[in-house]
Each structure stands twice: as structure tokens, then as C-alpha cells.
Image (cartoon, rainbow, N blue to C red):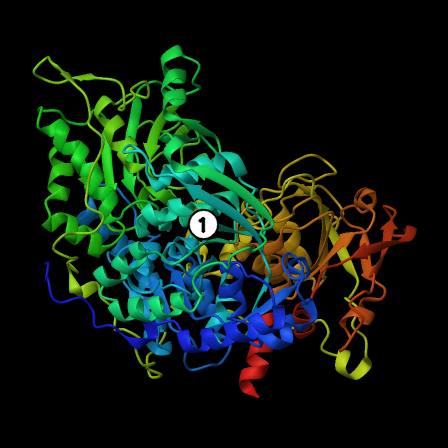
């Protein structure tokens, strides 16, 4: 039942620590004595000790950006239901009785779309009950705000409640940067990093480079902020933002609504950016007031006046791109990759001349998701639907609407927007991720080539309905809605006409709509609202059924260096090489998603997928290795890893370039360590994967000579010779670790032995984690002492 009570009482935990940040800004200015980017201001004012960290850098920004690890104090953390499981299981091993920063849990990813909001929610709650119960009880015990199933998608709820100018927050989801639309820095991380935040352990980030996107002009009526980021993705490609913050500036910024900035920040993840940054705008202030946070607005305005919330004049960026908003056209990206960018006219022309690789008929149109479900988005889509409805038209393909939150859903329902969309044939799904993350129980067209238009952010093959032949093209919700009335990809709503049921031509006028609801937001079902900043309740029992296949208590990993303190020996025990991985090895290849998502909270069960997508460089086969333990035949990779674990035999992996690229999926590191993997020796390793591995106590080294990659094979023995020089307390960071490789004959006798040089990029903090056996062990030791 809908209750429309007052919005939640504002809680002071939702205010960024402005006085402290302004004090720190004064220190940073004194130490660096140069103009600062906005990203630098927010990051450096969150340093544990700005003076100590920055003093050595002097005025030269290139000594920090891309070079220096920043130990940061995070203000807030948000976790979604799939990744929160492992984050909380890890936190529980630390032995603390409460979380140290404000945190929230959001149930959204596990809700499947099938029939419509009510029935889908009911079924998903029943099928995920044990997971939701676990998350709710752990939240209660440790003092975390719990947003249950039906309340909305993590990023929309964060935007409405927690995102605030100048804040530094983390989230256990790759689209966490969505919150940066509100002038903060929000960064996506894995569960082990989340535990840093939850325990107030300094969170380390390699200082990102800053890419400036300068906006001039104003968007034309058919264009939206989504088109800005779709266009930018085409320029930058999926890797162009890696290791960078995209900092938007210029006169064009002020004309964009705050929720539109969130859309742009959200999709910064698609170009690999750490996050995006926007100077404080009047529109952000209006959104803060509309969502019951006038206090934040007032304090943010004060901080903005004192220079915290924008870049300084004359600042130096690492790269610069200029976009004239008035020259942009509606843009569509895809299929299969979010950077395959084309203008609406190019897209339609391809369909008209038959050069498109997808069918002309649209099989589905989907709007909403965390990327595009603001009030403004929905209002503009409804304005198009109204025009069509006035001429008796309905959509010609299935048309699903996913509201981002109960606040948006209830408000668009009250204002008649939802009715307008359903009257033309739209179906409203639950306030959850649903079809955006494969939780779309789509029965039709499985295995068949078909094309869908969505206003979502990602379009990798199979992502939406598990059908790798479904081609997802990303666009603004307005373009998706208008094209749904044609049901075809060869229709350009800006220029083409449709024939209405009265037999006469119909042409869309550009969409229009209010950015914020004229009568304010209504919270809808207040039963979804959490207890703001709840006190921990230590007597709450955290429910994990020992028979469960989905949840399992985590056992801390032991340290292979336990004797180090006494003996001074910090060498890894002799390891066997599990395999030599060839080519691309993404986090998906190391820990597959899809049906395995069920086991995210059960390390033993999910580890059964370890490296099943990896290609063996010795036989070119995927998930097939030589069984050197029992001396015969070929077996799957997890089977060999399990055998080695059972024999208490440590192992290592040789990898090619960019091992672990793709996402922040921490299971890719946890599983390696769980099965007794201790070393990844690669040509190169993706940054987040590398940090995740070190956090779980896995040593990462790179070949000094890339050609040495071919010299190690499955079954070889690998030992470290002088890791001690690096790992002993106050060891020498410039140490080049040598590894000794021993090859064996079939009868087990030694065939040859040789040594190889390696290099590393581990910081003193990473070495602390590795010495302790994992970052968690270190946190626990500190908590106990
Ligand atoms: Fe959910 Fe899709 Fe966003 S999975 S968080 S709606 S990217």
C-alpha cells in the first residue's frame, strides 16, 4: 500500500565534513602552491595527512598524478546486494562491532524482471530470501542503512539521499561514479576496498590523471546529457579514461540538469574512468533542495564560495577535449560495445540502406535503469508518448520502463507520467536493475538475432537477456521512446513521419518536460525508507545457514610469511606453475558471472569457476590443463587448482598482457588465493585486479623481459630468490625480485634450472598486506590491538 508521508528526516551523517575539508584545502594550497583541478581538491582534502603526503611533490603535478599512492579518508560507502555479500563477510572477519563510516546496503541486482513490478518483486524476494535476510541482519548488527528490495537502484537512491558536493565516497559497483553528478567524487571498488572504508583504514588510490572536457554551447531540443557521454565514449573508446578522472568544465555545464550530469558520470565507467568531476552548479542546489537536503545546499554554497567546489583558474590538465553542445546530434552506441558511436542520422541511414548488421525490426525498447530514470527523463519521454497518444497511437514493440527508485516511481505515478507511458503500451517493472544485468526472464527470441534499444549504460553481448545474439543499442530514453512507436530502426523521429490510425501523417515535436516535479517529490511507500544512520545492534544474529549453497562464513587466509619475524625469511614457498595463460584474461575469464552470481557469498562454490575462461598457452584450449599432479591426461583448471590445494601445494600463474582487465570483481583475486595461488607473474596486470590480488595476499610481479613469458610452462617449479629484500620490514622498494624456474623430465628428475629477473610496482602498504597474508588480516590485527 502506498503511504505518502513526509520525506525522511535529514540526518547530519548526510553532510560532507566541510569545515575539515576547507582547513585541509588551505594546507594543500600552502604545500603545493599552484592552481588545482577540482578532482585534486576533493582528493587531496581527503588525504589522511595532506602535509605529509604532498610535501615531497612540490609544484609539479606530474609528480603526483599517475605516480603517487594517496592514502585517503573516505566519507561514505554504498553496497549493492550482489557485491555486499562478500564485502560484509570480509568485514565480519575483522572482529569490529560497528562500521566506522556511514554506509548503506541496496537490494536491486537480484530482482528479476518477468511479468511486471509487483509479481516480479514477490518472486525475487522469495527466491533470494536467505541473501536479503543476511544483508538485513548484518546491516542491523553493524549500523548500516538497509534499503530493501523494491526501494530502488543503488545509484539513484545514493543520488537522492547521500551524494553531496565535495564528498568522497566508494561503492561496490562499477557505476558508483553516477553520484559524482552531484559534485562529489564517487568511485567503484571491490569488497576488500569497501572493508577499508568500513573500518576507517586509509584507502589507497594511485592519484589519477585529470582529463578535461570543456563544454560550450547548449543542447538542441532533441539532445540530452546522455548524448554528450555517448559522443564522448566514441572519442575516448572503452579504455580512454583508464587511470583518469574526467573533469567537466566550461560555460555549457550550467545548462545541464543535475540528474543529467549523473548520467554522464555513470557512463564514465564505460570508458574506464576512475570517476568524473563537475563543479558545483545552481542545478545541483535545486536538486538538493528538492530531495530534502537544503542544509547540504547551504553548506555546499559556502564551500563553493571558498573555492572548494571548482577548479582554479589557469590549472594544468593532463589532456583536454572540447565539445560544443549545440553541434551535438542524438547519438546511438553499439551494438556489443558502448563506444561504437554514431549519430541518429547515420544510424537510421544504415538501417535504410541495409548496411546495418542487425534487423530493421526492433524487438524491444527499454528505458530507465540507474543511468536514465530521473523525473526529467520520465517527463520528457511522457511528453512524446502524449503526442502519440493524442493521435491514437501505441508503441509497436515491447516497451519496458524501469524506475530508478520508489521516490521517482511514486512521483511519476502521482503526476500522471506513469499512466501516460502505460496507456501507450508501456509496462512498468520493479524499482531494480532487472533487464540491465541479465535479470530479464525473456522467453522470446532466445538464440535468435534481434535488436533492442535501451537507455542503459552497458551493451556487452548477452548482458540483458542472456542471448548473445541480442544486439543492444544505447541511446537517450527520449530516442528509445520515440523509436518504439515506429518499432523500427530505420525511423528518425526528428525528421520522419509515421502514419497514425486516422491514416494521416504524424510527426513528433521535440520532447519537453520539467526537470524537477512542480509539486515536489513524494516518497511513495515509506516502508522502504531505512532508519537513517542506525545505531548498531550487537545482539542481532547474522543469519547464515550452514547448509546454504549461497552464503558461507569466510575463513581468514593464513600468511606464508608467519615465520618471517623470527627467521627474517620472506621468500614464498616453492610453487608449481598452474598454467601459462595466453592473451586476454578478463575478470570474467577468472571468475565468470551469469549463473555463478548466485554464489557470490559462497567462496567454496563460486571457486568452482576459477579461470574457466582462460586460454592455456600450451594447448590453445580454454579451461584445459595438463594434470601434472597425477601425471596423466587433461583436466579443467579448477580441478587442477583444487588438487594442488588438497596437497597443500602452493602454485602460481604465468599471464600475458593486462591480466584481470574488465571490472573490479574481487572474486577474481579471492578465488586464486582460496585455492592456494600465491603469485601472478605477468607481462602486465590491470591496476584494479593487481590491487585486489595484493589485498588478498597474492604477490604480483612483472617480467622484466617480456619474452621470458614463454619460458615457464604448466608444472614447472617457481621459487622467489630475494623477495625478502623487498618484503622484510623497511625493505628496499627498488629490489628486482629474481625467480628460479626448475623444469622436470617425465620421470620427475630435474631437466634444467634458470633464473629470471622481474619488476614490481608494490607500495609499502601493499607489502604490509602481503606480509600479513591479506589486508584483512592486517585490519584485524590492528583492531584487536
Ligand atoms: Fe543496476 Fe544496471 Fe545500474 S545493473 S546498478 S541498473 S548498470
- Report the residue that reaches farthest toward the bottom: 785
- Kindly tell me whether residue 662 is visible in this rendering: yes
Give 720 or 373, whichever is nearer the viewer: 373
Residue at image point 60% right, 47% down: 611
Q: Is residue 606 above or below residue 381?
A: below
Q: Which residue is mark 1?
A: 249
- Residue 252: where, in percent of width, then height? 38, 44
Drawn side of residue 135 relative to residue 468, left or right: left
- Residue 12: where, in percent of width, then height? 31, 76
**The C terminus appears in which quarter of the rendering?**
bottom right
- Residue 223: where, in percent of width, then height? 32, 34
Drawn side of residue 180 relative to residue 587, left or right: left
Tell me where residue 298 sits by quadrant. Answer: bottom left
Graded by Cα atoms within 10 Å as few (under 14), some (14 to 19) or many (20 or more), the crowding at tag 1 reads: many
Q: Is residue 633 above or below residue 20?
A: above
- Residue 705: where, in percent of width, then height? 83, 47
- Kindly tell me whether residue 464 is visible in this rendering: no
Give 417 or 78, whichever is nearer the viewer: 417
Residue at image point 55% right, 79% down: 780
**The N terminus appears in which quarter of the rendering?**
bottom left
Tell me where residue 560 sits by quadrant. Answer: bottom right
Q: Is residue 727 above or below residue 35?
A: below
Amino acid at each position: 500500500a502506498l503511504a505518502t508521508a513526509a520525506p525522511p528526516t535529514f540526518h547530519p551523517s548526510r553532510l560532507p565534513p566541510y569545515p575539515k575539508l576547507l582547513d585541509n584545502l588551505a594546507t594543500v594550497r600552502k604545500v603545493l602552491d599552484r592552481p588545482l583541478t577540482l578532482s585534486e581538491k576533493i582528493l587531496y582534502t581527503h588525504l589522511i595527512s595532506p602535509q605529509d603526503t604532498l610535501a615531497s611533490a612540490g609544484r609539479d603535478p606530474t609528480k603526483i598524478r599517475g605516480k603517487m599512492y594517496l592514502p585517503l579518508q573516505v566519507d561514505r560507502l554504498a553496497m549493492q546486494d550482489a557485491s555486499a555479500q562478500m564485502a560484509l563477510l570480509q568485514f565480519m572477519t575483522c572482529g569490529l562491532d560497528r562500521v566506522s563510516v556511514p554506509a548503506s546496503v541496496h537490494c536491486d541486482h537480484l530482482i528479476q524482471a518477468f511479468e511486471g513490478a509487483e509479481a516480479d518483486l514477490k518472486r525475487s524476494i522469495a527466491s533470494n530470501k536467505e541473501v536479503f535476510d543476511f544483508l538485513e541482519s548484518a546491516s542491523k548488527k553493524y549500523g548500516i542503512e538497509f534499503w530493501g528490495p523494491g526501494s530502488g537502484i543503488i545509484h539513484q537512491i545514493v543520488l537522492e539521499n547521500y551524494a553531496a558536493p565535495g564528498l568522497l565516497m566508494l561503492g561496490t559497483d562499477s557505476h558508483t561514479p553516477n553520484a559524482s553528478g552531484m559534485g562529489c567524487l564517487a568511485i567503484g571498488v571491490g569488497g576488500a576496498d569497501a572493508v577499508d572504508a568500513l573500518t576507517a583504514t586509509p584507502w589507497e588510490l594511485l592519484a589519477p590523471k585529470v582529463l578535461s572536457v570543456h563544454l560550450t554551447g547548449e543542447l538542441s531540443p532533441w539532445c540530452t546529457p546522455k548524448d554528450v557521454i555517448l559522443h564522448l565514449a566514441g572519442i575516448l573508446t572503452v579504455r580512454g579514461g583508464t587511470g583518469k578522472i574526467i573533469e567537466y568544465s566550461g560555460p555549457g555545464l550550467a545548462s545541464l540538469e543535475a540528474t543529467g550530469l549523473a548520467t554522464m558520470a555513470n557512463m564514465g565507467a564505460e570508458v574506464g574512468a576512475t570517476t568524473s568531476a563537475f563543479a558545483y552548479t545552481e542545478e545541483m542546489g535545486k536538486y538538493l533542495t528538492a530531495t530534502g537536503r537544503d542544509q547540504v545546499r547551504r553548506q555546499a554554497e559556502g564551500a563553493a564560495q571558498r573555492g572548494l567546489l571548482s577548479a582554479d583558474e589557469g590549472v594544468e590538465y593532463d589532456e583536454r577535449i572540447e565539445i560544443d553542445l549545440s553541434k551535438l546530434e542524438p547519438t546511438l552506441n553499439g551494438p556489443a560495445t558502448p563506444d561504437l558511436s554514431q549519430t541518429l542520422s547515420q544510424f537510421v541511414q544504415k538501417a535504410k540502406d541495409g548496411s546495418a548488421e542487425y534487423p530493421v525490426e526492433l524487438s524491444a525498447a527499454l528505458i530507465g535503469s540507474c543511468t536514465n530514470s530521473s523525473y526529467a527523463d520520465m517527463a520528457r519521454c511522457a511528453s512524446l508518448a502524449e503526442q502519440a497518444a493524442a493521435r491514437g497511437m501505441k508503441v509497436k514493440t515491447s516497451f519496458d520502463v524501469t524506475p530508478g527508485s520508489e521516490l521517482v516511481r511514486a512521483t511519476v505515478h502521482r503526476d500522471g507520467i506513469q499512466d501516460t507511458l502505460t496507456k501507450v503500451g508501456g509496462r512498468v517493472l520493479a524499482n531494480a536493475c532487472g533487464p540491465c544485468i541479465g535479470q530479464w526472464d525473456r522467453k522470446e527470441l532466445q538464440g535468435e538475432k534481434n535488436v533492442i534499444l535501451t537507455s542503459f549504460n552497458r551493451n556487452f553481448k548477452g548482458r540483458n537477456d542472456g542471448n548473445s545474439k541480442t544486439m543492444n543499442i544505447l541511446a537517450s530514453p527520449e530516442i528509445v521512446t520515440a523509436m518504439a512507436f515506429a518499432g523500427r530502426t530505420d525511423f528518425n523521429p526528428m525528421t520522419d513521419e509515421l502514419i497514425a490510425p486516422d491514416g494521416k501523417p504524424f510527426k513528433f515535436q521535440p520532447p519537453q518536460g520539467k526537470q524537477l516535479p512542480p509539486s515536489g517529490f513524494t516518497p511513495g511507500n515509506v516502508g522502504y525508507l531505512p532508519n537513517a544512520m542506525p545505531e548498531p545492534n550487537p545482539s542481532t544474529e547474522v543469519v547464515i545457514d550452514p547448509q546454504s549453497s549461497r552464503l558461507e562464513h569466510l575463513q581468514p587466509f593464513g600468511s606464508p610469511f608467519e615465520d618471517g619475524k623470527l627467521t627474517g625469511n620472506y621468500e614464498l614457498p616453492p610453487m608449481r606453475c598452474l598454467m601459462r595463460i595466453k592473451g586476454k584474461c578478463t575478470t570474467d575469464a577468472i571468475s565468470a558471472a551469469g549463473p555463478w552470481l548466485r554464489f557470490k557469498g559462497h567462496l567454496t562454490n563460486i571457486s568452482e569457476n576459477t579461470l574457466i575462461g582462460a586460454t592455456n598457452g600450451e594447448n590453445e584450449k580454454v579451461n584445459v590443463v595438463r594434470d601434472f599432479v597425477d601425471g596423466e591426461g587433461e583436466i579443467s583448471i579448477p580441478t587442477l587448482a583444487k588438487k594442488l590445494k588438497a596437497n597443500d601445494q602452493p602454485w602460481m600463474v604465468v599471464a600475458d598482457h593486462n591480466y584481470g582487465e574488465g571490472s573490479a570483481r574481487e572474486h577474481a583475486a579471492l578465488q586464486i588465493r582460496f585455492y592456494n595461488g600465491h603469485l601472478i607473474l605477468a607481462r602486465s596486470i590491470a591496476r584494479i585486479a593487481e590491487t585486489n590480488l595484493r589485498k588478498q595476499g597474492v604477490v604480483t610481479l612483472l617480467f622484466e623481459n617480456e619474452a621470458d613469458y614463454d619460458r615457464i610452462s604448466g608444472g614447472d617449479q617457481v621459487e622467489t630468490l630475494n623477495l625478502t629484500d623487498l618484503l622484510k620490514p623497511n625493505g628496499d622498494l627498488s629490489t628486482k625480485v629474481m625467480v628460479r624456474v626448475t623444469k622436470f623430465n617425465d620421470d620427475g628428475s630435474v631437466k634444467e634450472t634458470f633464473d629470471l629477473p622481474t619488476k614490481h610496482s608494490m607500495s609499502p602498504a601493499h607489502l604490509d598486506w602481503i606480509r600479513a597474508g591479506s589486508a584483512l588480516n592486517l585490519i584485524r590485527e590492528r583492531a584487536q590491538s
